[in-house]
Image (tube, helix red, strand yellow):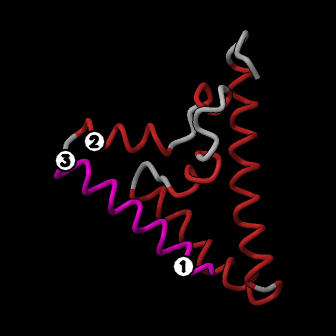
Amino acid sequence: MAPLFVLANIAVFAYKLHLRLKEGDPAFELFCYNYGLIPREVLTGRSLHSLVTHMFLHGSFLHLLFNCVPLYFFGSYLERDIGSAKFTAVYLCSGVLGGLAYLISEGLRSPGAPV
């Protein structure tokens, strides 16, 4: 599964690049808005799916690279150790928990936010 998650990350990055270059900024921005982690949208329940989808969005090639290289090498090792099902659960739960931590930190930085 680790290599598949790497491929999924690369595919989403390539699609974002395609949107920006071929479709223009509005299509690119809409894609990022619909699938990125936007606290207001999650906290109002309009974008709960983004707790998972944000994991596949990367802001730059280096961001993608520095996420995918460890995922491929460490993830493949971990997956061999614990199995594909548990690895998938760990990967997805880690992303969701990271998203929740981001939401909490945004609430702390923004007094009055409905966290």
| Image coords of residue 94 (percent x, y) | 74, 58
Residue 83 painted magenta = no
View extreme (front): residue: 46
Q: Nearer the viewer, residue 95 or 35?
A: 35
Examine the rendered structure and indicate whether residue 101 appears above or below residue 8. Answer: above
The residue at the point 59 percent across, 78 percent down is 72
Tell me the magenta residue range: 1-23
Q: CA distance from mark 3 to mark 1?
A: 27 Å
Specify the label residue 23 is tagged with: 3
Local SS, label 2: helix
Which SS does the magenta portion mostly show? helix
Dot in front, 1 or 2? 2
First of labels 1, 2 by sequence position: 1
Location of mark 2 (residue): 27
* View extreme (top): residue: 112
Element under disc 1: helix
Q: Which residue is mark 1?
A: 4
First in sequence, mark 3 or 1: give its number: 1
Residue 35, compared with residue 77, is above or below; it is above
Q: Are marks 2 and 3 in contact (CB under 8 Å)?
A: yes
Q: Is residue 2 left or right of residue 93?
A: left
Q: Amino acid at mark 3?
A: Glu
Q: Quadrant of residue 48?
A: top right
Q: Residue furthest bottom?
A: 80
Instruction: Count residues near mark 3 (Cα–Cα under 10 Å), then give few for <14, some for 14-19, many for 20+.
Output: few
Percent x, y for residue 105? Answer: 73, 30
Residue located 47% across and 53% down the image:
58
Q: CA distance from mark 1 to mark 2?
A: 26 Å
